[in-house]
Amino acid sequence: MIYSEYGQTGKKVSAVGFGGMRFDESKSNEENAELLIYAYEKGINYFDTAPGYSSDRSEDIYGIGLSKLKGTFYVTSKAMPTKVDTSEKAIEAVKKSLERLKVDKINFYHVWCIRNMDHYSLAMRPGGQYEGLLKCKEEGLIEHIVFSSHQPGDQVKQVLDDGMFEGVLLGMNILNFPYRWDGVSYAYKNKYGVVAMNPLSGGMIPQHEEQLGYLTENNESATEAALRFNISCPEITVTLNGFTTREQIDMACRIADESKPFTEEDINKIRAKLGTNMNSVCTACGYCKDCPVGIPIPSYMQHYNEKQIFSADDDALKNILKFSHEWGLLASNSVRAKACIECGKCERDCTQHLPIIERLKYLNKLDS
């Protein structure tokens, strides 16, 4: 395992981090907690979670698993300024997470899901979330205040330049790196901790191994290449993986142990092959799922990805949608794209600022 210092905190963290968003919800909390213990034994010491992950079971699963670890490890949690909009609510959220995680302190606590500067201003206002987190830090309930961003690079720089945080969590992978690199590089050069989420683009890379073969070298798969890209990147302190099985942990740890970085020549070749639409590919984060009329928006957006990534034409998308309604992602929900009332909630919730309403209109024309 590769270990490096998280920013200027003095903490040596593993290059592979355990992301608590992808547990197998058909299993018990105790069964899922065994994955944390296994990951720790393999060298992973950075464990990231949040309230709401895995149908709000993740923090409880972590509490079971972390309580059995012997030695040094680091745990994170989060709260959104839009939901925790006062100092009192921020303190309450931290204490609730501590209780569920069964730890004395949270090492890295995120102001979560900053999607624009208004969210940042909300967190930082007098009597707001950040003020509450400072009180928690003074009381020893948290150690380091960091933030989770879905902003463009220039806004990430702006937040970092204010000097209120010690690190940043943002989405970066082998498909979208040309559009995220400014923020990552700036944070690294200015000695902030940099944690990358979505290294497999929300599961899209494993689903399209053959089409993404150009990312690979020798006999590795596209999934392995994508993990290697992030894990071996010196600018990235920790790459979060949402583990569901031990085999997934084994793969990520093996890649960290072998750690053959991409050369500048390799990166330039990939950059040249990537389409111009990669920044607007849906990563299946699911924040748009609570549609007021019940449209399964994340599923529709995953199908739109076929157009974005592989230039699927209208006939191909028609067949994809037809199959999906019968057997695929859309089979369990009868509400179709045509039901959209254009309320805009999905676009406000979207971490990537995607034109979801426009995409639903387009898919509706093909959704016979």
Image: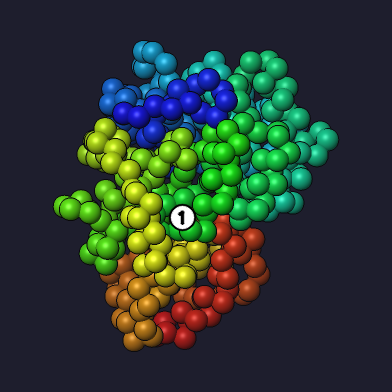
Q: Callout 1: helix, strand or loop? A: helix
Give the residue drawn at x 32%, y 25%: 43
What amino acid is at disc 1? Phe
Give the residue drawn at x 40%, y 42%: 233
Note whether residue 273 is visible.
yes
* Residue 347 coordinates in the image, percent (x, y): 61, 64
Note whether residue 106 is visible.
no
Q: How many labels does the image show?
A: 1
Q: Which residue lies furthest to the right in this view?
A: 126
Q: Residue furthest front?
A: 265
* Residue 297 coordinates in the image, percent (x, y): 49, 66
Whether residue 39 is situated above or below residue 198 in the rendered picture: above
Whether residue 227 is situated above or below residue 213 in the rendered picture: above
Q: Give the camera-side residue of 237 and 262.
A: 262
Q: Give the camera-side residue of 236 and 109.
A: 236
Q: How did the renderer colour the structure?
A: rainbow
Q: Quadrant of the N terminus?
A: top left
Give the residue drawn at x 43%, y 20%: 73
* Residue 263 coordinates in the image, percent (x, y): 34, 49
Whether residue 338 is situated above or below residue 178 in the rendered picture: below
Q: Give the camera-side residue of 264 and 100.
A: 264
Residue 252 is drawn in which quadrant? top left
* Residue 109 coordinates in the image, percent (x, y): 59, 30
Give the residue drawn at x 58%, y 33%: 191
* Mark 1 crowdedness (10 Å alpha carbons): few <14, some 14-19, many ≥20: some
Q: Quadrant of the C terminus?
A: bottom left
**Circle 1 residue:** 177
Q: Which residue lies furthest to the top in this view?
A: 70
Answer with left or right where residue 128 lies relative to residue 219.
right
Whether residue 98 is situated above or below residue 81 in the rendered picture: above
